[in-house]
Amino acid sequence: MTPNRTTLYRRPDGAEMTSQERLAFLLDIGGLDYQAAAEIANVAPRTIWAYRKPSSKRNVPDTIFSPIERHVFQHLSNIVTAAGYELRPAA
């Protein structure tokens, strides 16, 4: 099952975030710096830094974005579970 994240990656004005904005968003909510994100994605910290900068020409590759996204979502799930909540897939 592929999760629907269309509402997660939206700007306040309703427009869809660019891949650089999505990366910055994940780093912010996950509390990750460039070094930590680079270790998760198995790339150099400078690579994360370069992709985090706004650009209309370059998209963050899934090979970098996906492992960071999985890590952040797992981290958030762990926090919610530790707080005593049960997570279930949406119907």
Image: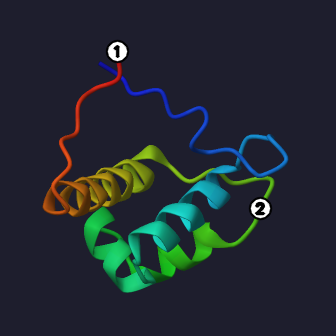
Q: Amino acid at mark 1?
A: Ala
Nearer to me, 37 or 73: 73
Hey, which quadrant is residue 14 in on the image?
Answer: top right
21 relative position to 42: left or right: right
Looking at the picture, the colour scheme in use is: rainbow
- Picture residue at 66% right of the left edge, 59% below the top: 21
Residue at the extreme right: 13
- Residue identified by numbered label 1: 91
Q: Nearer the viewer, residue 46 or 76?
A: 76
In this rendered view, identify the residue nearer to me: 37 or 71. 71
Q: Quadrant of the C terminus?
A: top left
Q: Residue at x 44, y 53 (%)?
A: 65
Residue 51 horizontal/vertical position (percent): 59, 67
Give the side of residue 35 with respect to residue 83, left or right.
Answer: right
Left or right for 24, reference 32: right
Name the quadrant of the N terminus.
top left
Residue 15 image offset from top left, x and y in percent: 80, 41
Please provide percent x and percent y for residue 12.
Answer: 78, 52
Foreground pick, 77 / 36? 77
Q: Which is in the foreground here, disc 2 or disc 1?
A: 1
Mark number, residue 7: none
Up/down of 51 relative to 36, above or below: above
* SS type, badge 2: loop
What residue appears at the point 61 percent right and 36 percent down from the top-left corner? 7
Q: The residue under label 2 is which amino acid type?
A: Ser
Give the structural element (helix, strand or loop) at label 1.
loop
Q: Residues within 10 Å of mark 1 (few under 14, many from 20)?
A: few
Q: Which residue is mark 2?
A: 55
Q: x%, y% of residue 6?
A: 59, 32
